[in-house]
Amino acid sequence: MSLTELQLEAASDQAEAIEQRLFELGAASVEFGDAGDEPLFEPPPGAHPLWTAVRLKALFTDDLRAEIAAAALAKYALPGTAIPVSPIVDQDWIRAGLAGLTRIHCGGDLWIVPSWETPPKVDRGVFVHLDPGLAFGTGSHPTTAMCLAALAAAPPRGQHVLDYGCGSGILAIAALRLGAAYALGVDIDHQAVLATLENAARNDIEPGSLDALLSETEPAAAEFDLVVANILAGPLVALAPTLARSARPGGRLLLAGLLDWQAGEVMAAYRNDFDIDIGAERDGWVLLDGHRR
């Protein structure tokens, strides 16, 4: 099937109306993006901000419909901007998406290796085989990379590990590969729970050593030697009581998914129960590292 893309730059207060009109004119999908290199940080709960100038990309399965839509929406375009309409060249999108993904050395003995890659020939290697999927977590994002490096630097041998916001299960599986006795993955997304269990099977994780649950099920109190949560600053603050109850006295806490300017607020939410500080920084993201009192 051939596709045609239409691009339109407009003011944010008109973006939703344009989106609706694009669908009425036959668009198969509409994507919002930043038209002015304007960063958006984590919004408060319930807020859904847009950039001041929004670039809408609409896909059409009919090039004539795309041309008609461009003409109909010309009045919405920002002054001095055009509405380009161009065909999208057919290609193997799956292969194209995987082309830039390769094995990752996390530190120590730990490696993340996609299924199409051969594990590196190293004297001591701990390999987690993980392919990109619907759930977050392939090891390439700075937040995940810092968590993996922390696990590799101090392997949780014999420990019980809680991975809250498990996504693909990468942190729980890495912990088990590094010698953890048991890991529990928790997430709000049913797809993440399924992905964690599927990735555990792909990595030959022993039955019974990893469970994955939806977050509506509260983890057992004071059961975990290591609690790791790679989410966002807002949820991390809200989860402080839950994660504090889950960690045994002396247990380690790793928190990621927050920007450097959010670290103070998150640490303040945990300081009643943990000795906590910044453990690592990468590309503006930070990892918080603490121990339960």
Image (tube, rainbow, N blue to C red):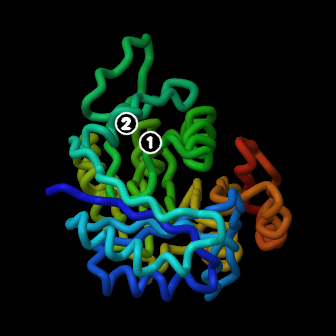
Q: Which residue is mark 2?
A: 128
Q: Residue at x 32, y 65 (%)?
A: 59
The percent position of residue 89, horizontal first and vertical second, equals 26, 45
The quarter of the rendered structure image containing the N terminus is bottom left
Q: Secondary structure at mark 1?
A: helix
Viewer can see residue 1: yes
Q: Residue at x 34, y 33 (%)?
A: 99
Instruction: Name above or below for residue 49 compared with residue 257.
Output: below
**Which amino acid type corresponds to the residue marked 2 in the rendered image?**
Val
207 relative to 80 in the view: left or right: left
The percent position of residue 196, horizontal first and vertical second, equals 33, 57
Instruction: Name above or below for residue 174 compared with residue 189.
Output: above
Nearest the viewer among 108 and 72 is 72
* Marks 1/2: CA–CA distance: 6 Å
259 relative to 69 in the view: left or right: right
Q: Which residue is mark 1?
A: 174
Q: Quadrant of residue 166?
A: bottom left
